[in-house]
Image (cartoon, rainbow, N blue to C red):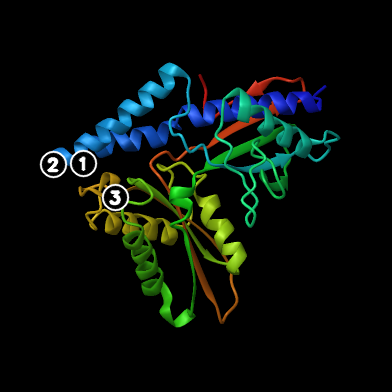
Amino acid sequence: MVVEADIQNAVVELLRRTVVKLPSDVEEALVRALDAEVDETPKMQLKAIMDNIKLAGEGNTPMCQDTGVTIFYVTLPRTCEIDVERGIIEGVRRATSEVPLRPNAVHPITRKNPGDNVGDGMPYMNWKVGNNDFIEITVMPKGAGSENMSQLAMLTPSQGVKGIKEFVLSTVLRAGGNPCPPMVLGVGIGGSSDICMKLAKQALLRPLDERHKDPEIAGLETELLDALNMLGIGPMGLGGKTTAIGLNIEYAYCHTASLPVAVNVQCWAARRGTVRIHLDGRLEFPTNEE
């Protein structure tokens, strides 16, 4: 029988694993980027990133001082009597002191910092109900350096695919070295303004080596990623072949008179992690196994 304390413990361990170790697809993409670079400056930057990843794992410490704000995606079984929301909130509080996480969450106007990463709307939780007999919790710790570079455009349908491409490229050009490239791009297309932004962030949850199931969208993902890597921004904005190690698109149908497009920018530390809490209390970490 799972109780709220089990949720708390799972969230603390999930956050510890997620801020310390990258998913294998992200780390492998960074290794490929290092192998592809020929100039010394980008190679040096990527080597420093790889050394940082190694040291974080060896020391069991966060790989970046900005441990972000905590964005959760939760899938509940059809019958669930546990206060999962409360468990997540208390888990974040505990993780802030136990991992530790930097206390990043502040009041937007007064900038008052409660010191535990908990406040109105934070941690933020996205909810859905599934057919599994376990609770699945995915977290994306999102730092500000990359999040601040994210953009939304309300294009007209006449701008079409050409307008989408121009907007994505201009967003990355405007970002330059600010989001600590090589970056990962989540692109949302369609829906409405709020739906589009949520799709862009959700796109960052998909592994970098997994193309969209829609062949037309998958082709656009590949085309945009190739174009981004021709910009020459490179690792840490110092030039090179690799400006982005991944680009994922998610879409929704939209109004006939509208074409929303959103870009959510992620830094090289594209952290995401999942825990499955089974009804017998067993924990499974499919993204961050040790």
The amino acid at mark 1 is Pro
Q: Report, in whole angstroms, how far the alpha carbon at label 2 lies from the one at label 3.
A: 14 Å
The answer to whether the residues at label 2 and label 3 have Cβ atoms under 8 Å apart is no
Residue 203 pos. (x, y %): 51, 51
Seen in the picture, residue 152 relative to 155 is either above or below; the reply is above
Q: Residues within 10 Å of mark 1 (few under 14, many from 20)?
A: many
| Label located before the other in sequence (2 or 3) | 2
> Is residue 16 rendered to the left or right of residue 26?
right
Q: Quadrant of residue 149?
A: bottom left
**Front-most of residues 249 and 105:** 105
Would you say residue 37 is visible in this rendering?
Answer: no
The amino acid at mark 2 is Asp
Seen in the picture, residue 102 relative to 168 is either above or below; the reply is above
Residue 128 pos. (x, y %): 72, 47
Q: Which residue is mark 3?
A: 243
Q: Report, in whole angstroms, how far the alpha carbon at label 1 lies from the one at label 3.
A: 10 Å
The answer to whether the residues at label 1 and label 3 have Cβ atoms under 8 Å apart is no
Q: Which residue is mark 2?
A: 39
Residue reaching furthest left? 39
Q: Secondary structure at mark 3?
A: loop
Q: Secondary structure at mark 1?
A: helix
Look at the image and tell me in which quarter the N terminus lies. Answer: top right
Q: Report, in whole angstroms, how far the alpha carbon at label 2 lies from the one at label 1.
A: 6 Å
